[in-house]
Amino acid sequence: MKKKKRIILFLLIFVLLMGTCSAGIQIVAKNINGSVSGRSRVFASVSAEKKHTIDLLVAGDSESYTSVSPMDLWDKTGIAAYDCGQPGQRIQETYYVLKTAFRTQSPKMVLLETNTMFRDPGFLKNLQMSLTEPLSYYFPIFKFHNAWKALFDGPGILQNAYKGFEIRNKVVSYEGDEEYMKETKDKTDIPEVVRIYMEKIRNLCRKNGAELVLMSAPSPKNYDYKKHNALEEYAKEKDLPYIDLNLKYRDIGIDWKKDSYDKGDHLNILGARKVTDYMGKYLQDNYGLPDRRGDDGWKDWHELARQYFEELKKKI
Amino acid sequence: MTYESLVYGFVFLPLCLAAYQIVPQRWRRRVLLVFSYLFFWLISRNLIVYLLGTTVFVHCIGIWLEWLKSEQKTELASADRSEKKKIKGIYQQKSRRVLAFGVLALLGILAYLKYYNFFVSNVTGILGNVLPFTLEQKKILMPIGISFYTLQAIGYMADVYWGKIRAEGKLEKTALFLAFFPQIMEGPICRYSDTSDTLYEGRPLNMDNLTSGYIRIFWGLFKKKVIADRLAIAVGMIFSNYTSYSGVVIAAGAIAYTIQLYMEFSGCMDIIIGSGELFGIRLPENFRQPFCAQSAAEFWRRWHISLGTWFKTYIFYPVSMSSPVKKWNQYGRKHLGKYITMLGTSAIALFPVWICNGLWHGARWSYIFYGMYYFTLILLGIAVEPVRDRILNTFHISDQSVWLKFVRIAKTWVIIFAGELFFRADGLRAGISMFRSIFTDFDLNALTDGSLFNLGLGRADMIAIAVGCVVVAVVGSVKERGTDVRKSLFRRPVFVRWALCYALMLAVIVVSAYGDGYQTIDMIYAGF
C-alpha cells in the first residue's frame, strides 16, 4: 500500500512538473514563434494573436490557406480572418487547432475547407493522432519541446505570414479536363474517424457561439462530384451551410491557366484573391460578420495589410 | 506500431498489463499470446500466417523428436546389449532426419523470402546470356521479425534433438515462445531455456518490476530518441552523398553511424527487455559495453550477444565437433603441427559462422563482405596470438597494463568503425569507394570549413548528441565496473532517486528528436 501511494505521489509530481514546463514553454513559444516550425507553427502563431481580435477562422489542409487571403478580405470587407490550416491537416489536428484558437479568440465563424474530411491515414495513425493531439493540447511541452534549441541556435527567421497566409506567386497551369465536376449519384465515403471529430468540431463551435460553414476550395486534383455528393449529404444531415466553389469556379473567374500554383492542386495568389473576393461577398451577404477597419483594437491590421500589398506589388 | 511509439507505450502496453493482471494466473500466458499476435498483426497484417505456420510446424517437429526419444527408450528397455547400439543408431538417424527436415524447411522459407531476388539478380548478372530460361525478380513481402523467430525456432528444435530441453507439449506455450511481442521485431534471439520459466509463470505484476521496467524503457528511449535519431540525419546525408564529402567527413560518418547503430539497437533492447520486466519476464541481455572490447572477437561477445551465442551454439560447436573436423585435427597434429592445425580448425569452424552472420543481416554483398571482414580479422587475431605473446614477453610488457588496454581498445574501435562503414554503405562498391577516400582524400580543412557542421544538425542538436553520449558512456563505465545501475539507484535516498527519474523522463520528452524538423526513424534491426 505504501508503495502504491508512493507511485501515485511520484506520478502526481510528474504531472505537475509537466504542467509547469508546459506553461513555461508556451510563453517561450509565443515569444519566439519564428523558431516554431512545421506543424506546430500554426498553434504557436494563432496563440500569439492579440486576444479576441479574430472573427473568422479558416481551417483545413493546404487547400484552406492557399484559397483565402485574410489581408485581401480585410481590405475589401474589414472581416478579421485567420488561416489556421496546416499542410495535410488531419481532422484531429483541425479540432485541436480550433480548440487552441478558441482559448484566446472568440470568432463568429469557422470556415472549414473540406478536403481534410476525406483523409484517413488508417487505424494506427488515427489512434496515434487521437493520443498525441490531446496530449499536446493539455501539455504543450510535447508540441513546443524543440523551443529549447533556440537557446543555442538562436531564434528562427520569422517568415512573412499574413495571418496564416503566404503569397505564392508561382504559376503551374492545370491542363486537365475543366469539366472535372461531372454529375454522378455516387458518393465518396467520409471516414468514421472524420465523422467522430466533425461532431466534436460542431460541438466546439456551438459551445463557443461560432457558426460552422463548410467550404470546398476550387481544386480539380482534389475534388469531384462524388465528394460533392458526400459533403452535400453530410451538410444536410447536420444542418450545416456548405458551399462548393468547384461548381462555381467560372463565376469566381478562376482561369486554370493562370490561377493554379501546381497543376490544379492548389491556387496561387491570383486564384486565392479571386476566391477571397467571392467569399467576402458571400459572407457579407449571408452572415453579419463585423467590419473592424475603423476599430481601435485592429490598428495593427492596417500596417500588416500595407506590408502585404507592398509585397504583392513586388511579386505580381 | 514500433516500440518507441506512443501507441505502444500509452495504449498497447497499459492494456496488456491490465488484461494480464485481471485474469487468473493460469490464463496470463494466453493474454500475452493474444496481445503478441495482435501486435504482430498490427505491423504485418496477413503475413502473420508465416508466424502461425512456423509455430505449428516447429511444435510438431518438437513433439516428433520427443516421440522418437520415447520410442527409443521403450525399445532399448526390452532390447539386449547387442541390439542396443543398433537401436540407438537407427533412432539417431531418424531424429537427425526429422531435425534436418525441420531446419531445412524453415531455412527454405527464410531463403526464399529474403534471398530469392538477390539470387536471381546475381545469377542473371553472371549467367544471363547462357541461361536457356529467364529468372524474374518477384515482389516478395517479408514478415517483420522472420530472421529472429526463425533462429529461435531452429534453436528450439536443435535443443530438443540434443536432449537439452523437453519438447513443449502445449501449442500455446511454443507459440508464445516464438511470438512474445517485446522481442518479435528485434530479438533478443532467445533460447527456450533462457525464457521459458518466467514467460509461462504468469507472475502477478508488482511495483518493483513495473518501476524497474519503466526506468529501463525510458533509458532506451533516451538512447534512441535523443542520440540515435539525431545522428541518423547526418549519417543519412553523408552516406547518400558520399561523393561530395572528403575523407575526414566520411570517417566522421563511419564513427557517427557506429554510435547511431549502438544507441538505436541497444536503446531498443532496453525498451524490449524493460517491457519484459514489467511482466516479470527476464529476456537475455544483448549488449555489454561493446566499446570496451579489446579485440574484434571480444567485441562480438559484447555486441548483439544473442546472435553471437546462437551462431556459437548452433553452428560453431556442431562444426567443430563434426567428424570431418575431427579427422582434420588428427591429420593435422600428425603432419602439420599444433599451430597450423589449430588455425585450420578455427578457420573451418569460423567461416560458416561469419558467412551466416553476414547473410543473416540481409541479401547484399556488402553484408557478406562484413561477415568475411570479421572472419579475416578474428582469424588473424588467432594467428598472431603466439607472436604477440612473444613480443610482450621479450619487452617485459604486462598483458594487463593500462596503456596496452587503451591501445587495444583504440585498435578495436578502428576495426569497428571500418566494419560499420561497409555495413551501412549503399552497396559494396560504395563502401570501397568511401573507405578509399579516407586515405586518398583526407583533407583536414573539413574540420574548419564547416563541412562537419552542414550535415542537417544545428548546434543544439550537436550539444544534445554530445551530452547524451557522455551520459551513456558514464553509465556504461559504471556498469563495466560491475555495478547494477538501477539497483544502485534504488539504494539512494528517495529525493535523489526521484530527481534522477524525473530528469530522465523530462530529457526524453523535451530533448528527443521528434515533432517538427524531425522524421520518424525506422528501427534498423527490424529491417533485418
Image: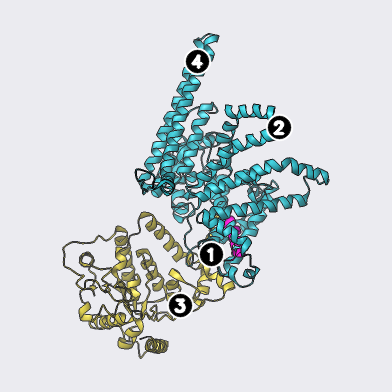
In the rendered image, residue B292 lying in the magenta stretch gets the answer no
| Mark 2 residue crowding within 10 angstroms, few (<14) / some (14–19) / many (20+) | few
Residue B142 is left or right of residue B326, and the answer is: left
State the mark number for residue B338.
2
User: Label 2 is placed on what type of residue?
Assistant: Lys
Q: Secondary structure at mark 4?
A: helix
Q: Colour of chain B?
A: cyan
Q: Are marks 1 and 3 in contact (CB under 8 Å)?
A: no
Mark 4, chain letter? B
**Point 30% across, 73% down: residue:** A263
Name the residue carrying label 4.
Answer: B87
Name the residue carrying label 3.
Answer: A48
Labels 4 and 2: the sequence-earlier one: 4
Q: Mark 3, mark 2: which one is toward the viewer?
A: 2
Residue A268 is left or right of residue B376, and the answer is: left
Labels 4 and 1: the sequence-earlier one: 4
Mark 2, chain letter? B
Q: Are marks 4 and 2 in contact (CB under 8 Å)?
A: no
The location of residue B208, given as percent across then percent down, is 58, 45
Discs 1 and 3 carry the same chain letter: no
Q: Nearer the viewer, residue A131 or A2?
A: A131
Color encoding of the figure: by chain
Q: Nearer the viewer, residue A84 or B88?
A: B88
